[in-house]
Amino acid sequence: MQLALNEAFDRRSINLLIAISKINRIDVSGEGVLDCASLISADLVSVRLLTGTIGRAGGGPSKAIYQLALTEKGKLFMEAWQNGDQEKAVTLI
């Protein structure tokens, strides 16, 4: 199972997928969205622009905040992975 995942995603992407799965939703800046680009393009993670922004210390420009969450496909993938169902997980990605 790990071999199949390593073929599809780098270690950082896999760790991000696990973290999002455990936390449910995570708020990130634009850089965080880029870190999850492979998961977003695989439709395992969804991204939504939140209405608020956070200001930078010293009155610098503000940053947009995005919310990352598992898609239905992502939830099914994580379920298959946790159950050791490699065939189902691989067909989802």
Image: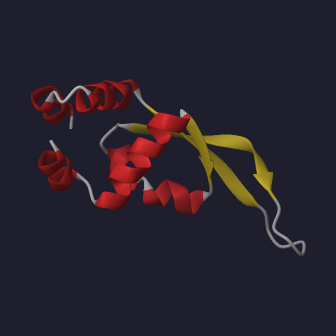
Frontmost residue, 15 versus 38 = 15
- What is the quadrant of the N terminus in the image? top left
In the displayed structure, 5 sits above or below 12; it is above
Residue at left 13%, top 46%? 4
Q: Is residue 69 visible?
A: no
In the image: residue 91, left or right of residue 27: left
Residue 34 point in image, percent of width and height: 46, 59
Q: Residue at x 9, y 29 (%)?
A: 87
Q: Left or right of 72: which side holds 48?
A: right
Can you tell which quarter of the image residue 63 is in? bottom right
Q: Which residue is drawn at 89% across and 75% down?
A: 58
**In the picture provided, is 59 more to the left or to the right than 46?**
right
Closer to the camera, 68 or 48?
A: 68
Quadrant of residue 10 within the rendered picture:
bottom left
Q: Position of residue 9 (x, y in %)?
A: 25, 54
Spot occupied by residue 71 in the image (x, y as percentages of width and height):
42, 29
Residue lying at the far front of the rendered structure: 83
User: Relative to 78, is 39 above or below?
Assistant: below
For the point 47% across and 44% down, the residue is 19
Task: State the scheme by which the image is colored.
Answer: secondary structure
Quadrant housing the C terminus: top left
User: Residue 59, relative to residue 3: is it above or below?
Assistant: below
Location of residue 31 (image quadrant): bottom right
Is residue 57 visible in the rendered structure shown here? Answer: yes
Q: Position of residue 50 (x, y in %)?
A: 69, 41
Q: Which residue lies furthest to the right in this view?
A: 59
